[in-house]
Amino acid sequence: YDPMIAKLITYGPTRDAAIAHMRLALDEYYIRGVTHNIPFLASLFAKDRFVKGNITTNFIAEEYADGFTADDLPADDPTTLIAVAAAMKRRIVERNIQISGQFPGHEMRAPEQWTVVLGGVYHDVDVRPAPGGYAVVIGTEAIEVKTDWQIGEPLIHANVDGRPVCVQVDRTGVSFRLSHSGVQAEAWVLTRPTAGMHKLMPYKAPPDMSKYLLSPMPGLLVKLLVEDGQQVKAGEPLAVIEAMKMENILKAERDATIAKTHAKPGDSLAVDQKIVEFSA
């Protein structure tokens, strides 16, 4: 495809081989700091019509009639991410237990039993060292993960049961944010006792901010074009913010009624500060 950052080209002796190379290359394409369309491209290369070459200039309009959503991403077996997350955690623990100053006879040992929490589902796994990597058992399924991944590397290249895999890794506190085949998932790898306590933790749902117009940047609210109780249509201007000597017009994303205004002209706004509240 032809993005603004760089051009990515793959090839192979057959169309299927070239597409397989492209899907792996997209997994290896590590971009941070700007938005990108890799999830959409991962979805596109998994479409049966594209794989078969049955495409026209209307392909995208026909396959994504309502636009691209997460539901369009290829269904991927979570086993791969579970095994990779477990292997990474084992490697991290193996380094941690090498800390000096331990009491003789009381040295730390790497646990073999873990629980991987992926998508809110708890998966009990066993992880043991094996030649070139680790043997991971998920339930009754044994999986071989061979990798030379080093802690801190943003990409883990692994051979999972003989299949080459690349997963992008970001550490978010004690969890991993994994990206593979266009899908991004957060994985927690916990000891069994910790996982048992984790299940008891109450879930705090994030606040619904969809009913607010938020300031997208620090700036000065120059104009507020609506008032309480006013009905607005999609695309109608709501406010004007001045930032970096430029005026930015904020428009309604859908038809709505103004429930309350939270700011007034002349206010200095912070990022994500409430400007307008819509009726539910």
Image (cartoon, grey):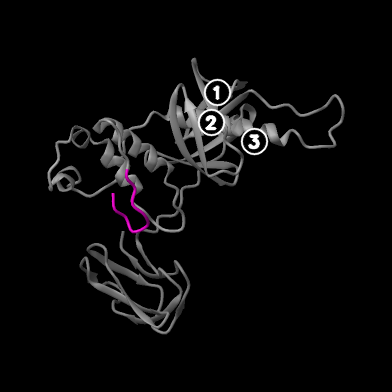
* Callout 2–callout 1 Cβ contact below 8 Å: yes
Start-end of magenta stretch: 1-9
Is residue 250 rendered to the left or right of residue 87?
left
Q: CA distance from mark 3 to mark 1?
A: 16 Å
Identify the residue under disc 3: 92
* Residue plotted at (16% across, 48% down): 61
Identify the residue under disc 2: 116
**Circle nearer the N terminus (2, 1):** 2
Q: CA distance from mark 2 to mark 1?
A: 7 Å
Around disc 3, counting alpha carbons within 10 Å, would you say few (fewer than 14), some (14 to 19), or many (20 or more)?
Answer: some
Magenta stretch contains residue 248 = no
From this viewpoint, which residue is outermost toward the top?
Answer: 140
Q: CA distance from mark 2 to mark 3?
A: 15 Å
Tag 3's secondary structure? Answer: helix
Around disc 2, counting alpha carbons within 10 Å, would you say few (fewer than 14), some (14 to 19), or many (20 or more)?
Answer: many
Residue 190 spot, x, y in % from top left: 60, 32
Q: Amino acid at mark 2?
A: Val
Q: Locate the C terminus by quadrant.
A: bottom left
Is residue 30 rendered to the left or right of residue 107?
left
Q: Amino acid at mark 1?
A: Val
| Vertical order, 273 against 210 (above or below) | below
**Circle nearer the N terminus (3, 1):** 3
Residue 107 spot, x, y in % from top left: 80, 28
Q: Considering depth in this image, is 271 or 151 the residue closer to the camera?
A: 151
Is residue 190 rendered to the left or right of residue 101?
left
* Residue plotted at (48% across, 72% down): 270
Identify the residue under disc 1: 125
Q: Main secondary structure of the magenta part?
A: loop
* Residue plotted at (60% across, 20% down): 130
Residue 256 spot, x, y in % from top left: 25, 64
Q: Amino acid at mark 3?
A: Ile
User: Does any portion of residue 38 appear in the rendered image?
Assistant: yes
